[in-house]
Amino acid sequence: MTTSTFSEKPKFIEDSAFDLGEAVSFVEQPILEKKNISGAEAVILSLIAEQVEAVFGYPGGAIMPVYDALHGYNDKLKHYLVRHEQGATHAAQGYARVAKRAGVCFATSGPGATNLITGIADAMIDSTPLVCITGQVARHLLGTDAFQETDVIGISMPVTKWNFQVTRADEIAEAIAKAFYIAESGRPGPVLIDITKNAQIEMCDFVYRKCTRVRSYVPQLPIKMKAINEAAELINHAQKPMFLIGQGIILSQAQEELKKVLEKSGAPAASTLLGLSALSHTHPNYVGYLGMHGNYGPNVKSNEADVIIAVGMRFDDRVTGDLKTYLKKAKIIHIEIDPAEIDKNVKTDVAIISDAKEALIALLPKLKQKTYPEWMAEFKECDRIEKEKVLDKDFAPNTEKIKMAEVIKMLSEKTKGKAIIVTDVGQHQMTTTRYYQFEQTQSNITSGGLGTMGFALPASIGAKIGRQDREVIAIIGDGGFQMTLQELGVIMQYEVGVKIVILNNSFLGMVRQWQQLFFEKRYSFTEMHNPNFVKLAEAYNIPAKKLEKREDMSNVLDLMLDHKGSFLLEIVVEKEDNVFPMVPAGASVSNIRLE
Amino acid sequence: MEQAYTISVFTENKIGLLNRITIIFTRRKINVESLTVSESGISKDIFRFTVVIRTTPDYIGKVVKQIEKQIDVLKAFYYEDKDIIYQEIAMYKMPTSVLAKSEVVEKIVRNNNARILTIEEEFVVIEKTGHEDETQQLLEALRPYGLLSFARSGRVAIAKPMKPLALHLKELQEANS
């Protein structure tokens, strides 16, 4: 026996003295087990263990064993054959956004895998959980420039939350369990598992346990009450508080908590593009939509607010405009799950690193019951100005052709704001998000951060498959539609009942608008000679109609909405209409243009 | 104003993680001035990256948060030069004849606190640890005498602040339980 010469409490702990625990932890009880099966079957059983209902994919050489294994499980796992792998990712995104869980895609190696990248990048920037599984050439061929070999791990690294290459069958179950855990926890995002062909063919004993922890990854930091108290103090003493709400509300299912906080604090709330539908547009505290083509009030008033409470949003440049002039009068509270977003674009005074729901639950009892009639009246006054300068023009039937805004307004009324609205990118997207009166949550599916044209058609397919009980309407421009129109084949083959509205102005409208406003009307390659969309749809056995006259609009929209199953409606709209208000890129939100 | 920062990253030992970390710099057009990767003292499966970059005080924190955000990264820290003790190692290969012919090279070695690692028939290898300017100074001093080859490592660094990594890791574990 020796006596320690150190005091009982050592002053310093050695780095090596700390036990970090297991690198990855799993639930002890397996969900699914099967002896001596192929890696490919293990892939399928892993997805079944995760209760995946739908997979969007496209087969090819390197993933053929997985497709072969899938053949025996068609009753448990529904696979949708897309017409291009980009369509698989967007469909999986649409599915994930409405089904509240990761969307799953399959693709083969090489071009199959690279075709996924746009959708993965879109999911990354818009925080959508995806699990993408790609086939890869056999282990011994890696690095030999084998047929359809591409470094998909390297290529997808900047646009995935996590990715991993599996080269042995016995790695499959754990890799997929980890993939789902990482994709769906914390700030959601896309993950990719690349599986070499030999790993799909080899045999293994399959045991599936759900992943519960990765020691190097903290999905959610514990909430700091000090920050909550500081935030409550600022809100309770504010003269002109304002909430900026983002997709974090929807992702954390904090819609009810948000309502309670708004109703108690009395503060107005404006939504980002991806935050739309988190709060009903008829809620008394809802003052509109932020950003480049958002509402007048929320944009200019954010620069007059004295306390800003940003919840689950990331201060995208399309929301902030010129940062040097943004929110200069306000103390800023930022509630955000991802620590890397804090102070990234806008310096915060109080950071609450938390998921939106927990933060709002903690905040609610600390808030005083308040109202701001004068401050709210300022927003009303802005609405009046916006109505006079923008809405009255947008809705006035004073043009030869129908205007986009008229269509959206009528569609919103006819669906009572309760449809899932999937938009592409451009003028139609901004018009739809401006004028569709979202009543129900998880109803706005759009490509926000990446601005991916071609997103809407496949995303609407995924959304409909995820929520068969709801009306899903894809609203797409003539340009974006032609980027992924091959996915009409999926609608045909699986009878996916989406309604497709093409707002056809025979232009790449938003680019044309910029050319008009900032490039002296030099319309460089923005005019489009379009195909006959109705015939195209009919080629895919999808009923279709072309609408040109304003007086027919109501009847034709009814016809589409009443139709059971998919329907394509082409609406010929004004060619050179502009979307206003507009914060020119790089300008201050205070300098929003109304005309 | 841009200045040098030393970033210490503690990670799982995973293929491709180096790439995940460097693309964070690439995307922001930041050059990596020096990089050292090796097993850490914590355990065999935890690795330590030491990266030296130049950027602004405003930007460094954002970049390090992006590194820490990577799934397989346990913890990332950044330091200014004044907050760390750091060293690099340099090796210089010289013809054995220059040592035999004159005492000058021997004096240079002595004055620079360098040491001779090996003496072969044709060449000797001299080793010096120190800051980059010190190893550079020795390089300039030896060059006129027929330097055959030169190699310098990336930086390794130990932080001066006394909060041990173990405490950071404990916090991490508590947050993750």
Image: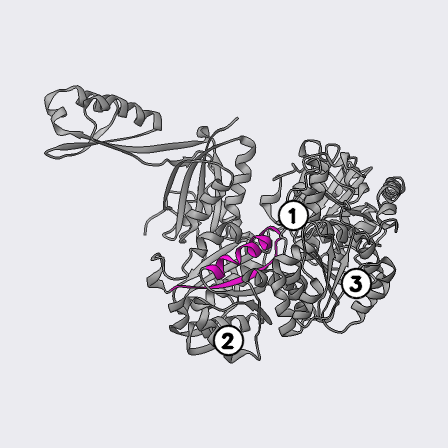
Magenta residues span A111-137
- Residue A565 lies left or right of residue B58; in this view the side is right
The residue wearing badge 2 is A70
Give the number of the mark in front: 1 or 3: 3
- Residue A296 lies left or right of residue A425; in this view the side is right
Mark earlier in primary sequence (1, 3):
1
Residue A117 on image: x %, y %: 53, 55
Residue A147 on image: x %, y %: 38, 62
In the picture, the disc for residue A418 is: 3
Q: Is residue A113 magenta?
A: yes
Label 3 packing within 10 angstroms: few (<14), some (14-19), many (20+) = many
User: Secondary structure beneath disc 1?
Assistant: strand
Amino acid type indicated by mark 1: Glu
User: Secondary structure beneath disc 3?
Assistant: loop
**Disc 1 versus disc 2: distance between alpha carbons?**
39 Å
**Above or below — where is A34 with respect to A491?**
below
Q: Quadrant of residue A579?
A: top right
Residue A136 on image: x %, y %: 42, 63
| Chain that bears disc 2 | A
**Viewer-proximal residue among A477 and B108:** A477
| Discs 1, 3: same chain | yes
**Disc 1 versus disc 3: distance between alpha carbons?**
28 Å
